[in-house]
Amino acid sequence: MRKVVLDTNVLVSALWSNQGNPYKILEMFFQGEIMLYYNHEIMDEYSEVLHREKLGFPKNKVRNLLNEIMSKAVFAESPKSKMHFIDESDRKFFDLAKYYEARLITGNTRHYPSESCVVTPHEFLKDSSHNNI
C-alpha cells in the first residue's frame, strides 16, 4: 500500500470540491487504497486551518474528516531535518514523508525541496494509475 502525507492545502481543496484530484486522493484514503501518515503537529494544523471561519466549512464535516483521519491513518513521529524551508510550518509534512518513505502530496511544491517524494495531486494520481494503485 502506498504511503502518503497530505499537505493541508490538499484537504482544503478536497473540501471545496468533490470534482478535483485532491478529492480523489481523499477518496483513495477512505477506501483503504493509500495509507495516510500524520502526527500531532499535522493534526493541529489540519484542525486549525479547516476550522477557519473564512473557509466556511461546516463544523460537522470538518469534525468527521478529522475523526476519520485519526481512526484510519497512521500516527507517526519523525526526526526533525536540518533542511532550509521558506515556511518553517512545512517542515513537519516533509520530514514525516521522508522518514517513512511516503509521498508528500501538496498543491505548493515550490514550498518544499525539489525531491521525488514531493508531488502534486495530479502527479500522484498519474503515477498511481501507472502502478495500478
Image: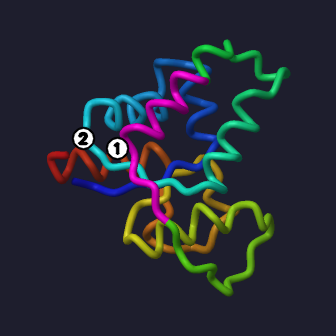
| 46 lies above or below 85 | above
Q: Residue at x 23, y 44 (%)?
A: 129
Element on which disc 2 rests: loop
Q: Which mark is residue 27?
A: none
- In the image shown, does 7 or 59 lie closer to the viewer? 59
* Image location (x, y in percent) of residue 82: 68, 87
Picture residue at 59% right of the left edge, 49% below the top: 7
Find disc 2 in the rendering and name its residue: 33
Q: Nearer the viewer, residue 77 or 127?
A: 77
Residue 131, position as x, y percentages in the image: 18, 53
Q: Is residue 105 left or right of residue 46?
A: left
Say if 101 sits above or below 47 in the image: below
Amino acid tagged 1: Leu
At label 2, the amino acid type is Glu
Q: Position of residue 106 (x, y in %)?
A: 56, 50
> What segment is highlighted magenta in the picture?
63-76
The residue to which callout 1 is attached is: 125
Between the C-alphas of marks 1 and 2, the distance is 12 Å
Say how many tags the image has.
Answer: 2
Q: Hey, which residue is sitting farthest right in the picture? A: 54
Quick check: is 15 in the magenta stretch?
no
Can you tell which quarter of the image residue 79 is in? bottom right
Q: Do the residues labelled 1 and 2 touch (CB within 8 Å)?
A: no
